[in-house]
Image (cartoon, rainbow, N blue to C red):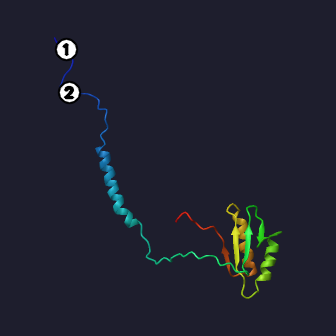
Amino acid sequence: MGMNVGSSEGDDEVMATINTTPLVDVMLVMLIIFLITIPVVVKTVPVELPTATNEATITKPENIVIAVDRDGGVYWNDALLPDYAALLEQLKAIAPLSPQPEIHIRGDALTRFEGIGKVIVNCQRAGILKVGFITQPDLSGR
């Protein structure tokens, strides 16, 4: 009797590679489905958007700059105000002037929004019609 050591019939070797063909097929089908369905899902209402223009701030002598520092201190032009009640009194004093001066708010980038909000509320209570914000220009887009 003989012993069969290596047979060419019935090769039972373990396959160590992964067949990626089905994975690629599934990914291509999913890509096609997404390319077809995304324009259908993303619908927008046709509107004419306004164009933005950047105008330089025209500083008039009658304009008032209210600054809020990072600690919450409020400044009328360059003078530190003791509290928001003093700010309201000064705003009420200039509100009846004709033409009414514009209020420009300069807020520190690290200040809490609460301080800026109190300035806006006091402007509203005093009856100020024109309130604007002074910011640094964004030069990164150029």
Image spot of residue 59 (x, y percent): 68, 78
Tell me: residue 54, above or below residue 1: below
Going 66% across and 71% down the picture, which residue do you hit? 134
The residue wearing badge 1 is: 3
The residue wearing badge 2 is: 10
Gap between marks 2 and 1 measured at Cα = 16 Å
Q: Secondary structure at mark 2?
A: loop
Tell me: residue 32, above or below residue 74: above
Going 65% across and 79% down the picture, which residue do you hit? 58
Going 44% across and 74% down the picture, which residue do you hit? 45
Residue 2 occupies quadrant: top left
Tell me: residue 75, above or below residue 62: above
Amino acid type of the residue tagged 1 in the rendering: Met
Q: Closer to the camera, 61 or 35?
A: 61
Classify 10 Å Cα crowding around label 1: few (below 14), some (14-19), many (20 and above).
few
Image spot of residue 102 (x, y percent): 70, 80
Asked whether residue 10 appears in the rendered view, the answer is yes
Amino acid type of the residue tagged 2 in the rendering: Gly
Asked whether residue 118 appears in the rendered view, the answer is no
Residue 11 occupies quadrant: top left
Image spot of residue 140 (x, y percent): 55, 63
Tell me: residue 15, above or below residue 48: above
Going 74% across and 72% down the picture, which residue do you hit? 66
| Quadrant holding the N terminus | top left
Q: Closer to the camera, 132 or 59?
A: 59
